[in-house]
Amino acid sequence: MQAFVNGIPVINNLDAAQQYAANINTFEILNQSMYDSAAYAAAGQNTLTFFQVPLGAGTGVISGAGKTYEDTNMQAAGAMPNMQAFIVTSVEVEFQPDITFTAAALPAAFGAQAVATAINDAWIFRATGFLNFTIGQKPYLQEGPMMKFPASNDFEIDAALCDTTTAAAASQSRIAFGKAVGPAYMLNPNNLLLIPMQNFVITLNWATVQAITTKARVFVRLMGQLLRSAQ
């Protein structure tokens, strides 16, 4: 029974205080991903780091301004924010070649004869490196190469073409794109729970720097379920 002093309720434990809570002690579950992106330099690099720079901070790969939802949906730096958690069920890596959008390197192009660099760049990226997923100070996933982490949503081309040109013109039509295919990298039965304010990080790593033709963009997506306070 609630005790009173001079008509004022006595709050002497957390259970007694719950009736005055502005937030209800209930969580809602949303099926969505946690994602982040980074630029892959044409010269290559030894490490790309993900999930450390939240919305509004850092630099978006394409915009050059602070990160927006085009780049990430991280609300806090390196951790789930308070009152939110995430159950990771699978890990995906998406490679987007030539995000400078150079006309001659687009998936469909016509012009001077050239190598289909989008395919070669995708192969170099997918055939090398490894992923490291760390929660707190403990690594929970170390796997490579990047071919092991196909994206469930990606760009795909099925095409056929025929060119007729003169030797002097030396032009060609090109339709070219390459991606990793295969089953998603599932963590089942050992899904991972990211609790509020617990630091985590994913890095993509290369022992040998792998150069590509032009700057690309890489997305890492943690697929699963977001748990947040229903308020």
Image (cartoon, helix red, strand yellow):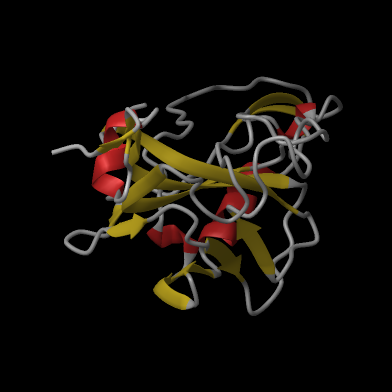
Q: Residue at x 74, y 66 (%)?
A: 45
Horizontal relation, residue 120 to residue 214: left or right: left
Residue 202 vs residue 104, the one in the foreground: 202
Indicate whether 222 appears above or below 111.
below
Residue 116 in sight from this viewpoint: no
**Res 56 quadrant in image:** top right
Work out which residue is located at the far right of the displayed protein and give it. 168
Image quarter hosting the N terminus: top left
111 w.r.t. 144: above or below: above
- In this view of the protein, can residue 55 be seen by the observer? yes
Residue drawn at (76%, 47%) of the image: 215
Q: Look at 56% across and 42% down and name the residue there.
A: 74
Please provide percent x and percent y for residue 86.
Answer: 36, 47
* Residue 184 rendering spot, x and y as whole percentages: 30, 50
Question: Which quadrant is the C terminus positioned in?
Answer: top left
Residue 173: horizontal and vertical position, in percent?
66, 25
Q: In front here: 166 or 24?
A: 24
Please identify the residue farthest to the front as the structure is shown: 6
Give coordinates of residue 191: x percent, y percent.
25, 58
